[in-house]
Amino acid sequence: MIKKVLIANRGEIALRIVRACRELGIQSLAVYSEADVESLPVQLADEAICIGPAPSAQSYLKADRIISAAEIADVDAIHPGYGFLSENADFAEQCESCNIKFIGPKSSAIRRMGDKSLARETVRKAGVPIIPGSDGPVTNENEALKLAQKIGYPVIIKAVAGGGGRGMRIAHNDVSFAKELGVASNEAERAFGNGTVYVEKFIQNPRHIEFQILADSFGKTIHLGERDCSVQRRNQKLIEESPSPFLTSSMRKHMGRAAIKAAKAVGYENAGTIEFLVDDKGNYYFIEMNTRIQVEHPVTEEVTGIDLIKQQILIASGEKLAYDQRDVTFGKHAIECRINAEDPARNFAPCPGTIHLYHAPGGHGVRIDSHAFGGYRIPQYYDSMIGKLITYGNTRTIAMDRMYRALSEYLVRGVETTIPFLKAVLQDPVFRQGNATTGFVEEFIKRAPSELWTKNQEEE
């Protein structure tokens, strides 16, 4: 059994891991930047070590400093959380070479699934449907243009090493294709140090549905159902729920089997997520695998009753999965809203600053995963997430009504937040009827006057 874990992350996910370790009787070591010295994970972990200045490039992305901290503190394992180095195959490989357990998949699986083009080919061979597109990276502009014409517009240009919506551009004709090809490549080079791209058919207004995977080192792989992540803005998710209001039981069964096939194709171990796009006819296509824990993992935890962070640690400890597929049941409906320090009235501009008053909602069927508190200063150096609000109940209607009530109770003063915007979405008939696709937020912003959420701010 792992006895001590270094948490190579910050914010709410670092705190989530501290809590899981404590329940398992495992010591936790938080590493932190100078900007996070007063953060809750640092205060609540058993030990803490500063690894550098505030910018992530000088702290949370410094693999050598994290490994040094692990060796100084004599830890058994490193949990990377999400973001930062969580899907960095070189970092996982460094951990392996230093005989420190990386709580996640093997570096070979990260590398294979991290290359989007290679991942497509891998799952295609495993019999998982993929979106029509290039057989690999496109290197010649003229050949890429011919391919786009053959596939048929619109097409989407994607970075091979992409993520978080960066290095992605949509082209609707030959002229825009030539322009967006260069833009996508340049953005990918800046963001990931790799400007290689590939081309796919762009499926308009699909649903974005992902399946949670757990796999041990003994060959057992199961899925824990799906999460519908269609409510997103610029490829950044805002609301997630499970089960999807769109999937039928037959679709869920087939997609779950496909997700397991995809994971097994790379000998996957630990927790991961297989992401699909689903068109209006119910056809589903693999788009990528996230080889880490997801921001929205609490949705699955509340629906299934399975603690995913604990499972990650137990699998990394060499234990067999305690669940078979037939043991996984979906007894509730759960919804998660991401509470960000952003101003929806100013195009969701980040709003770093000090929280003067913080009051989290509570009551039956409400969960908060947050590292925020009154007096906490949101740094400008990292993402703007304040926390995640999760509500659950026996039906989707109960979960939605509970979410609206909880959002109304959530008080954050001193910075602008997405709470008023999320309240407006929760009341929208398209969302409530379960008809939201990936184009929902842009369409909602166009038809719903901004006064709808500005007014809510004033009322509060």
Image: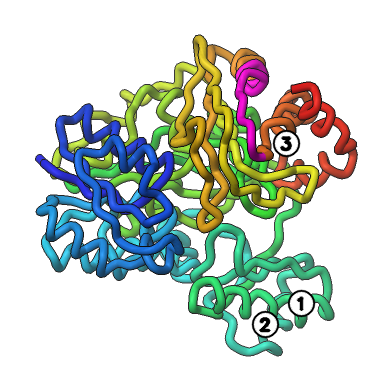
Is label 2 in contact with label 3 (beta carbons under 8 Å)? no
Question: Is residue 396 in view?
Answer: no
Label 2 sits on a secondary structure element that is: helix
User: Residues at badges 2 and 1 in contact (C-beta under 8 Å)?
Assistant: yes
Q: Quadrant of the C terminus?
A: top right
| Residue occupying image coordinates x 32% and y 59% | 266
Residue topped by disc 1: 177
The amino acid type found where label 1 is placed reads Phe
Tag 2 residue: 144
- Mark 1 or mark 3: whose residue is earlier in sequence: 1
The quadrant in which the N terminus is found is top left
Q: Is residue 292 magenta?
A: no
Magenta span covers which residues? 403-415
Whether residue 146 is situated above or below residue 45 in the rendered picture: below
Say what amino acid the circle numbered 2 marks: Ala
Image side of residue 108 versus residue 348, left or right: left
Mark toward the start of the polypeptide (2 vs 3): 2
> Which residue carries the number 3 mark?
436
Q: Quadrant of residue 165?
A: bottom right
Q: Quadrant of residue 158?
A: bottom right
